[in-house]
Image (spheres, helix red, strand yellow):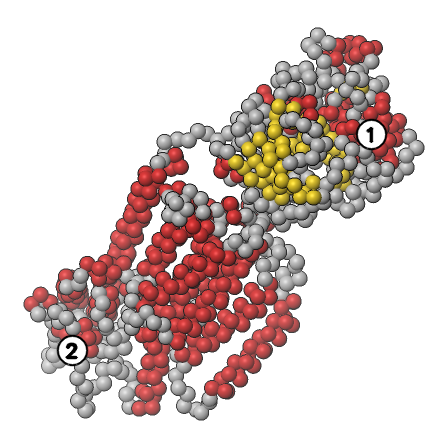
Amino acid sequence: MTTPPTGAPDHTTGPGRDSTSPGRTRARTSWTSTRSRLAASSRRGGLLPGRDALVDAAFTVVLVGLALVGFRTDFAGLVWVLPAVAGLVLGLLVTHVTTAYRLPIVAPLAAVTVLYLLLGGPLAVRRDLVGGVLPSGQTFLDLADVSVHGWKRLVTLLPPVDTGSGLLALPLIVGLLGGCVTYAVARRWSSPYAVLPAPLVLLALGIVLGTLEPAALTVQGAVFAVLGIGWMVARAARTRAPLQNGAGQRTRYGIGAALVGIALVAGYVVGPLLPGAGSTTRLVARSHVVPPIDIAAFASPLAGYRKYTEPNPSALWDTPLLEVQGLPAGTPLRFATLDSYDGAVWGASERANSGSLVPGAAFQQVGEVVSTKGPGRKVEVQVSVPEGGYGDVWLPTAGTVAGVKFEGRRADTLAGRLWLNIDTNTALVPDRLEPGDRYTFTAYVPPTQEKMPTSLPIDQSSLADEIDTSFLDAKLDAFTGDAADPWAQFTAIAKVMASEGAYTDGGTENSVERYYLPGHSLGRLARFVGLAQLAGNDEQYASTLALMANRVGVPTRVVMGAITPDSGPVRGQDVHAWVEVRDSQGQWVPVLPGNFLPDRNKKPKELQTKVEDRKVGALVPPPAGVNPPSVLQGPDQAQNATNLKKPPKKLFDPSAWPWWVQWLAVLGLVLVALTALYWTIRGLKAWRRRRHATRGPTASRVAWAWADLMASARSYGHRIPRRSTRLEQASAAGGPVDLRPLARSANGHVFGPGEPSADEAAAYFAATTAARKDLRANADFWRRLRSDVDLRPLFTRGPAKVKAPTRAATPDTPSPAQPTPVGSM
């Protein structure tokens, strides 16, 4: 480019600029050069980063890393660190390479997507890998599913989540996108403030996805704020013009330090006075997400107790139900803890305990590891279901559950739909256990106390205040006698039941005991305590004892399960119901059936059974108006339970396809998405170009047409200076296409004395369109593709609106040069 002769107009100033002040021009030029230094450093084409790039990379790593610390409370241990750090580093490297080679911003986003699919398997999912390294079709499906639905599963799972859930892909996603977007903004935009929104969004995301326990309060608060301000200050120093008033670097640093000090003092003083500052409850997503589980859809196991007794049509009395190894003999094996009574049935409630990490959620999805600890020693128990054995939704466990791992052909299905109430330690699998299912649970099991303690400090309250149980008062007075404190009254009730009551399972079909019906509704229990002699089985005795205990202020709940035998499998004869009492420390103390249940061989008196024969109508409890919570209609759960299994797999279920079909499906979806994105970008650029060519003043249309042409030339790889005249830009374009006639024509239309006509503006737009086609024809395939997907023309700021000249053109005024067709150049 030749230097303009002396006296020639300075095109670098542009119309309307003051070129008479050398000092002001030098300051403006220095300001322009320093502001463009950041963008120019990323367009040199080299992979070796400069000082500014290293500073931006360091701040990106630190700030995004601090935001990723929010996952600490979501996952068990430090397993989340590897995918999070790997994602951050890979996102940073990919963005650096694509920025160094001046690729559009869509390039690093596409690259991190590919890296997520290729490396997400070994880094996060770690299942269904080919050779333990290469991803399979199922791996791709799992990664895609986690990227869409994993966020909801994370906030509904009981924290901390274990590695087997597949949700480690979420820290990988956040690390990849966080490193990519933050560093890309830092290297492509010179604004000091543009770099902070992305890390702030990541920080807020980590808090929202976290728990009520802060991950790192000081680090994510004060340290993040100080580093963020420091980064903005460092970037602002790059674009600061040289000062002419003598103010030096020390002065600026002093002013900055003083401002930071004022901000810290103001935050310390004013912060506690802001709205919400005095609240101790964090706002997290899991506090406002209701887990998608309806406990009322599952029958209470106590309603079907009689199917385990003898005689019974189910014939489960001597049938092996469960094979249990690792649990000491005599230890209670819990099916379900039933802590809610509605007048019809004892069922599992949906209320959460006060110390839950997820307020309002009782049953929460869990993985293989549960972050709990209880009294007793830690045991590992193996459970398997033999043929014809246990088949219910309630998962047998013991003690304080610390983890469950499934095995067998349905391991993934059961593990993905395991729910646990950490207050009652009741586990639930809606798909039901089936013969052949195996699982291992880890639990803290205290020593079994077969006898009740003589004294126990209890937490005096009631779990059944809403139900009218005044019909028990007559028996309470007779059972408690002179006992004064609530625990003494409780033990007195249990002893009277065991010594004076009778046991019956309903007898045979022709037995007089058949009139002792199953159930534990208010009607059935009123008949139970209304007789001269109590007569029933575990269902009636445990239910009545729990209601009487709550009546005298002893918080008591019912547990349905089995007592582990000395040897052999758990059979129907080992199934029992017992109660648990809450002490003053909040612990639940089991009271086993041997403390309140009469001997099985002690049958009801014959005279009483004959009386009941005449009162058979009175023994039938009235039908319930609606289904009570946690119970299905009918006492026999095996005959009336709703089919809760998943529907069979269909032809369009991707998980049932062969792996190569899954690969082809994923590849097809990716190609369709990329094609749609390609034509969407091209269509938006064409729409924007046409819009500016047909609206506004005609001189502005011409200026916009030239600006759009220069944006296209840049996307084809031409180095077009931004702050220069049109003739200088046309000369810089070079190549086989001469754009200087179009530049002269644009200058004539814009700076001429008259406003160009609409036809002249349309003709100029047609000429620039032809020139754009010639530029495309002289570019190779990859440059054309890069230009097609380049998003920069969509966000390029066009020239300022050109106003029409106030004076009319005279015959002596030369007309603007007409555009010359590029093809004839």
Q: Is residue 227 above or below residue 13?
A: above
Dot 1 lies on which element?
Answer: helix
Q: Amino acid at mark 2?
A: Ala
Instruction: Identify residue for label 1.
Output: 494
Judge whether 215 appears above or below 467 on screen.
below
Q: Position of residue 758 (x, y in %)?
A: 18, 66
- Identified at 26% across, 55% down, the residue is 683
Disc 2, SS: loop
How far apart in space, not on screen, are marks 2 and 1 (Cα)? 112 Å
Q: Quadrant of residue 779?
A: bottom left
Quarter of the rendering occupied by the C terminus? bottom left
Name the amino acid, label 1. Answer: Ala
* Relative to 795, 173 lies left or right: right
Say which residue appears at 57% left-offset and 53% top-offset: 77
> Residue 61, how many percent across, how many down?
46, 66
Percent position (x, y) of residue 357?
63, 50
Residue at image position (54%, 37%) is: 406
Answer left or right for 718 relative to 515: left
The percent coordinates of residue 76 (x first, y second) are 57, 51
Q: Nearer the viewer, residue 102 or 258?
A: 102
Mark in the foreground, 2 or 1: 1
Q: Earlier in the sequence, mark 2 or mark 1?
A: 1
The answer to which quarter of the image holds residue 497 is: top right
Residue at mark 2: 809
Locate the N terminus by quadrant: bottom left
